[in-house]
Amino acid sequence: MAAPLPVTRADDSGGAPAQGGGAEARRAVTALLFLAAVALPCLVLYRAMAPGAMLLRPGAAAVPWRLTATDAPRVNADLDGDDARLERVLREAAMANDTVILTTLNSAWSEPGSVVDIFLESFRIGESTRELLDHLVIVSLDTTAHARCKRIHRHCFALVTDGVDFSGQKNFMTDGYLKMMWRRIDFLRQVLEKGYSFICTDTDIVWLRNPLPHFYPDGDFQIACDHFTGDPDDLGNNPNGGFTYVRSNTETIEFYKFWYAAREKHPGLHDQDVLNFIKRDPYVAELGIGIKFLSTELFGGLCEPSRNMSRVCTMHANCCIGLNRKINDLNAMLRDWRRFMALPPKDKHSVSWTVPQNCSLQKLEQ
């Protein structure tokens, strides 16, 4: 630092500079300049660091001293990462009326040539179904399934459940199967709360026609059946949770909360059996939710195959235990469908399903 310049002070009479206090004044000015020279860099450094300044105390980790407006979105994104990710995927996949198609997938069903490949192929060869793939979200239950989803489909969401492994084959009514089904019910409640209606479909269902025109206009909760009595309002229908259409509203959100909570009153039962218990519950009637059961003519399955290939929308490999059996009969459904579509209109009435094959009830009983 350069030496300070000498400073003189004029007396009141305007005469020569006073000599008595000159040295003392020079020392005072020197001290002030020195303090300014030290303080100015510190002030600049402080202003540069202030937005991210950290306040430390001995033995403590650094904590934010002040959270600025620009920092807040980043912190919130970290805290709500899964929620923000789900919102983004749903928004990108939604139809104009905020409806999405959802299916869940684990690694056992995600292998090449397995259930998910048959599922996606049905959309490609179905009647007015290819465009629906733009609105399908595959919800993967483990990392292997998620990696496969990203290779074969556009909209994927990883649903992670701490401490639960959903990767392997989950046979019907095993502990792993029950946890997987109830996790799905809770997830669907989240989707409804975000304002999205949905069609939830099991992956072991082939889509042959667009089902949207066949849903009831006054049904909040619409579900396929293992057995259909012929009356869509009959609570005696035997529902199958593998295919549902649900509108997002206050009634359905509360219904899914009630359904999920009811698992504790009925331990060891899956979501379909619990639904059969609660569908007549006074609280469900009090909610005023419109429940409709879907005809097996339009939404069939191996339990009760559709008899009309000219109208059927979906076919489900239900009433079937075992992955290989499902794959066999799902492939047979696609062969039947291709044969039907290849025929001229006058001959289509002659085609019928060749299923069940490996999934026949007789073989299941052996």
Image (tube, helix red, strand yellow):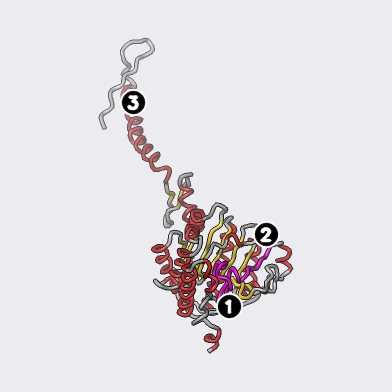
Three-letter amino acid code of the residue under disc 1: Cys
Q: Is residue 206 left or right of residue 36?
A: right
Magenta-span inclusion, residue 298: yes
Relative to 169, does residue 12 appear above or below in the rendering? above
Magenta-span inclusion, residue 299: yes
Label 1, label 3: how many angstroms apart (C-alpha)? 107 Å
Farthest residue in the front direction? 346
* Residue 237 seen in this snapshot: yes
Farthest residue in the left direction? 2
Label 1, label 2: how many angstroms apart (C-alpha)? 27 Å
Say few, some or many: other residues with alpha carbon within 10 Å of mark 1 (under 14 / 14 to 19 / 20 or more). Answer: some
Three-letter amino acid code of the residue under disc 2: Asp
Location of mark 1 (residue): 303
Relative to 129, does residue 21 appear above or below in the rendering? above
Q: Earlier in the sequence, mark 1 or mark 2?
A: 2
Residue 315 in the image, given as x and y percentages of width and height: 54, 71
Label 2, label 3: how many angstroms apart (C-alpha)? 96 Å
Tally of marks: 3
Location of mark 2 (residue): 218
Three-letter amino acid code of the residue under disc 3: Glu
Say few, some or many: other residues with alpha carbon within 10 Å of mark 3 (under 14 / 14 to 19 / 20 or more). Answer: few
* Region of the chain picked out in magenta, as a range: 289-316
**Nearer the camera: disc 1 or disc 3:** 1
Location of mark 3 (residue): 24
Say few, some or many: other residues with alpha carbon within 10 Å of mark 2 (under 14 / 14 to 19 / 20 or more). Answer: few
Work out which quarter of the rendered image holds the N terminus and state it.
Answer: top left
Query: What secondary structure is the stretch in magenta mostly built from?
Result: loop
Q: Residue shown at 53%/89% (left/top)?
A: 366
Residue 36 in the image, given as x and y percentages of width and height: 35, 32
Q: Residue shown at 38%/40% (left/top)?
A: 48
Residue 171 in the image, given as x and y percentages of width and height: 51, 79
Which structural element holds mark 3?
helix
